[in-house]
């Protein structure tokens, strides 16, 4: 599994439409997704997938140079339901298909029916013309970060959760990551995982390059992340990567986001089969959820005081990339993730289109 | 517009599912389409597009090396609702988007709702990454054959039909073919066009190469085509192509097909909004409806006496291509067309995927 910082053939996204997840008939979210797609398309080809019902809308909203395909899903998080692309020894692209159960299935899943989500990986891989490998593991792309040199970081709270893989031991999961992603060492972070994803690593830390991590950090005792980031730092400082290197760790602020207001959630539909949204829920402030593109980094902006500082830190960490902030990303956070969660890179690999 | 005999990047197909068109829950037709796709895939990449409902079925039925995409349609005739691909002066691929009204709209259209069919050209062109040109002309790919050197053959009964383009003169349509396809001379065949398509040219004749045509021919006075093929021959012999050449014309038999039996149509659903199928309807026996692939010609076979003779004539006309017959094509004929009608070539062009 290549690191996200390695060369991409392009980036894949889905188009948001669920009115029980996204407010205002999903229109503000659609505009935010279009802004993200447009920002990434400055660096690499972007494909946005929409359902039959929304294809024409998506085609109208997205700029002409962004490809819009018909491809069904149950929501808009292709990082999690899409394929994890890897390259084999011959350099050929393969799509790894995780089992997907909407972040917990019957025990914490966010909606009742995820059949279309669970086909996204296979469909995208087919479009690309790559071979598919069905892993059998319940996992999501947002639960794993790899350095392209044999190291994977993930969390016990998610992948070892009984609502994902009740019958697999840690060693058995390590073996699957080895078989599917070519991983030599899995670093299992101990976090509480109280969020909807049960603690996705892409809300916590990520690789800047092999040996260098960026870690979401706050010195604000009132924030949920205060204890967690300290525990994660301690754990990361005490370990090494697959090559035996100690990590260099760069701290990136977490935006202190106001919780959802009653006005914000007032027109989100409450329907059977999904979690109702409520006022005063926490809103994810993770700049860490950026997307590394070819020659660029695309970073959420929330309209809060830390926005510029986050851009500056990322720019310093990625001196050879153009760092672009996308305004209005609170809209995506209210759905439960951010730029990294709604994107999936396709590395350059032999035998694949694009 | 390149000739079909010029190099392809690949071939596009749709997946049949309508139970008011295809008997046996469309399963026999699906098997026939798979046989066609498999035959063509020997020569060039094949992509089959299925609706969300049928994607998994299509993926299971089609061999692994055939790409299966989710892409909605109202039936299975991509020759007609798909894009006509052309190349501009710079060699870039463009998709021409005809207006599609199910072969006649409110006056003879075969079903009531063709909204998804009418998006196929745009969607396929978007997948390919080519530019789209909306022609504004009601036309179908099966209504036109081009020689790649400025000549187009079509029929008045179809493209000049008031159920397609009531407000356009022949000269105005010629101008649209010039603007969109780079055509210098349109040959307008005078045929009755009594079939469901109002006389598609791809059931009558086609280009083997510039200057050489193949013409569906019968000496059986009892067949519908008896008068028609003589009239068409006379018209073609009396004209020249865009380069001023007289045509060399190769006669290809029409299979004398038994009409539909009561047993054959017994489980075709009769539903609101589409034409009911009846027993004793004529079944299209056109070997002429073959598909020219890279290095191959894929020809319908009907299990009748003329099958081998048709293959031999086509093999002689295309000495540098492997001619492959596909058995069981009566199944496709019962839906209203054959191999050419269910395929659409994508020529090799700059700026496009595949």
Image (cartoon, coloured by chain):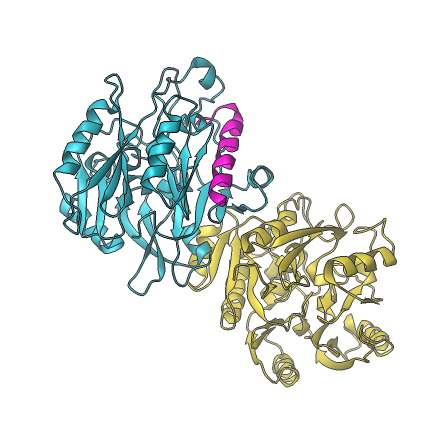
Chain colours: A yellow, B cyan
B240 over A280 or under it: above or below = above
Residue A25 visible in the snapshot: no
Q: Where is residue B290 in the image (x, y as percent from the top left)?
A: 37, 37
Q: Which one is in front, A39 or B40? A: B40
Asked if the stretch drawn in magenta spans residue B24, the answer is yes
- State the predominant SS element of the stretch in magenta: helix
Residue B176 visible in the snapshot: yes
Quarter of the view holding residue A232: bottom right
Provide the residue span drawn in magenta.
B20-42
List the single residue furthest toward the left. Answer: B238
Q: In this view, does B348 lie to the left or right of A45?
A: left
A217 over B340 or under it: above or below = below
Asked if the stretch drawn in magenta spans residue B300, the answer is no
Q: Where is residue A136 in the image (x, y as percent from the top left)?
A: 75, 49
B104 over B187 or under it: above or below = above
Give the residue at x 62% y 53%: A131
Q: Is residue B122 left or right of residue B221?
A: right
Q: Where is residue B6 in the image (x, y as percent from the top left)?
A: 34, 51
Quarter of the view holding residue A139: bottom right
A214 over A20 or under it: above or below = below
Q: In this view, does B261 lie to the left or right of B190?
A: right
Quarter of the view holding residue A171: bottom right
Give the residue at x 80% y 72%: A242
Q: Is residue A65 left or right of residue A203?
A: left
Give the residue at x 67% y 68%: A2
Q: Which one is in front, A194 or B159? A: B159
Circle count: 0
Q: Which one is in front, A98 or A325? A: A98
Q: Position of residue B5 (x, y in %)?
A: 34, 48
């Amino acid at each position: 599994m290549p690191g996200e910082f390695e060369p991409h053939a392009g980036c894949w996204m889905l188009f948001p439409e669920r009115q029980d997840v996204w407010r205002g008939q999903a229109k503000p979210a659609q505009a935010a997704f279009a802004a993200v797609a447009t920002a990434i398309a400055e660096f690499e080809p972007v494909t946005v997938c929409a359902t039959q019902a929304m294809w024409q809308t998506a085609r109208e909203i997205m700029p002409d140079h962004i490809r819009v395909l018909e491809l069904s899903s149950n929501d808009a998080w292709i990082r999690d339901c899409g394929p994890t692309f890897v390259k084999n020894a011959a350099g050929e692209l393969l799509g790894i298909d995780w089992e997907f159960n909407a972040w917990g299935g019957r025990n914490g899943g966010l909606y009742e029916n995820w059949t279309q989500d669970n086909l996204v990986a296979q469909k995208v891989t087919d479009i690309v013309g790559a071979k598919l490998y069905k892993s059998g593991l319940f996992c999501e792309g947002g639960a794993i970060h790899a350095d392209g040199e044999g190291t994977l970081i993930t969390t016990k709270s998610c992948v070892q959760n009984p609502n994902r893989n009740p019958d697999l031991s840690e060693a058995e999961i390590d073996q699957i990551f080895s078989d599917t992603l070519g991983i030599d060492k899995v670093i299992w972070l101990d976090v509480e995982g109280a969020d909807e994803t049960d603690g996705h690593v892409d809300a916590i830390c990520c690789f800047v390059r092999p040996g260098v991590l960026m870690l979401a950090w706050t010195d604000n005792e009132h924030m949920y992340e205060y204890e967690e980031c300290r525990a994660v730092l301690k754990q990361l400082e005490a370990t090494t990567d697959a090559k035996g290197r100690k990590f260099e760790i760069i701290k990136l602020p977490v935006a202190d986001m106001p919780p959802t207001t009653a006005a914000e959630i007032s027109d989100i539909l409450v329907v059977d089969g999904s979690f109702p949204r409520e006022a005063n829920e926490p809103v994810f402030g993770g700049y860490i959820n950026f997307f590394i593109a070819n020659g660029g980094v695309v970073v959420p902006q929330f309209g809060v005081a830390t926005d510029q500082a986050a851009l500056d830190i990322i720019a310093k960490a990625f001196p050879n990339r153009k760092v672009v902030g996308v305004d209005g990303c609170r809209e995506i956070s209210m759905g439960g993730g951010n730029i990294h969660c709604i994107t999936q890179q396709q590395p350059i690999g032999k035998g694949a289109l694009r």
